Image (tube, rainbow, N blue to C red):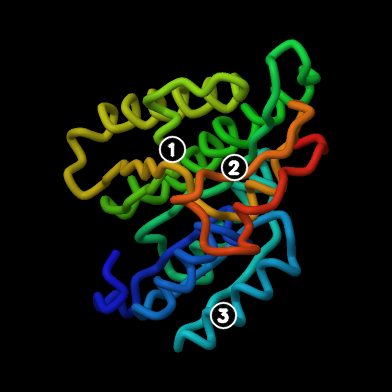
Amino acid sequence: MSADRNLAGRRVVITGASSGIGAATAVAFAKAGARLVLGARGKDGLDDVALRCVEAGGSAIVRPVDCTDAGAVAAFAAEARHLLGGIDLWFSCEGVGVLGRYEDVPIADHARVVEVNLVAHMNDVHAVLPIFLAQDHGTWVNMISAGGFVATPYAAAYSASKFGLRGFSSALRGEVSKRPHIHICDVCPTFVDTPGVDHAGNYTGARLSLPRFARTGDGGEGSRAARHAPS
């Protein structure tokens, strides 16, 4: 999205908006004049992003929501629709990761990656698609990854979730193919320097960092090791 594109009045919802790409996207939309409702689990992070949206010349309403909870997402979508008077675009940007040999990573961590990276996105669409259909327009933007095309050894659950998410998007695109004003869009970046790198579970026994080309600079997120913690 061009930062100077006029999106004044467009009604935008972003989940996973409290940091990283979701936060940067929120600020860009605010600068372009969109009306925003932002969701994520962390209220403090959301409040910080809302302040950045104001500093960019826009505004944002924030609501904590756990997108792995289908009922909570449905309520969040209904409130966003009420607050904005409709929803023109929904950007699903939640995601987590865990690194290590498949057998060394607790199965609960693998399950959590799939729950956040795939099921949460499915929950988002299940909540917003009826709104799009009633309006006869709307765009769902799905944060996938280049990892949805190329397998990632030592991140098997991540790979499974992203391949699954790409297939899910493709299936949905077929279902709405006769509704020309409803769009299913995918975003597939490669390595990006975000807090998600530090927050990934690390069962490799090694220090991890992003490739040099993905770092924002010395001391950036990509230059620090991922922490050993459940994802």
Mark 1 or mark 2: which is in front?
Answer: 1
Residue 24 percent across, percent down from the top left: 49, 66
Which residue corresponds to mark 2?
A: 95
- Looking at the rendered structure, the secondary structure element under dot 1 is loop
Along the viewing direction, whichever of 22 and 168 lies nearer the viewer: 22
Labelled pair 3, 1 in contact (Cβ < 8 Å)? no
Which residue corresponds to mark 1?
A: 145
Q: Is residue 62 above or below residue 42?
A: below
- Looking at the rendered structure, the secondary structure element under dot 2 is loop
**Total label count?**
3
Q: Quadrant of residue 68?
A: top right
Q: Is residue 64 rendered to the left or right of residue 172? A: right
On the rendered image, what quadrant is the C terminus found in?
Answer: top right
Dot placed on the residue nearer the N-terminal end, 1 or 2: 2
Dot placed on the residue nearer the N-terminal end, 3 or 2: 3
Labelled pair 1, 2 in contact (Cβ < 8 Å)? yes
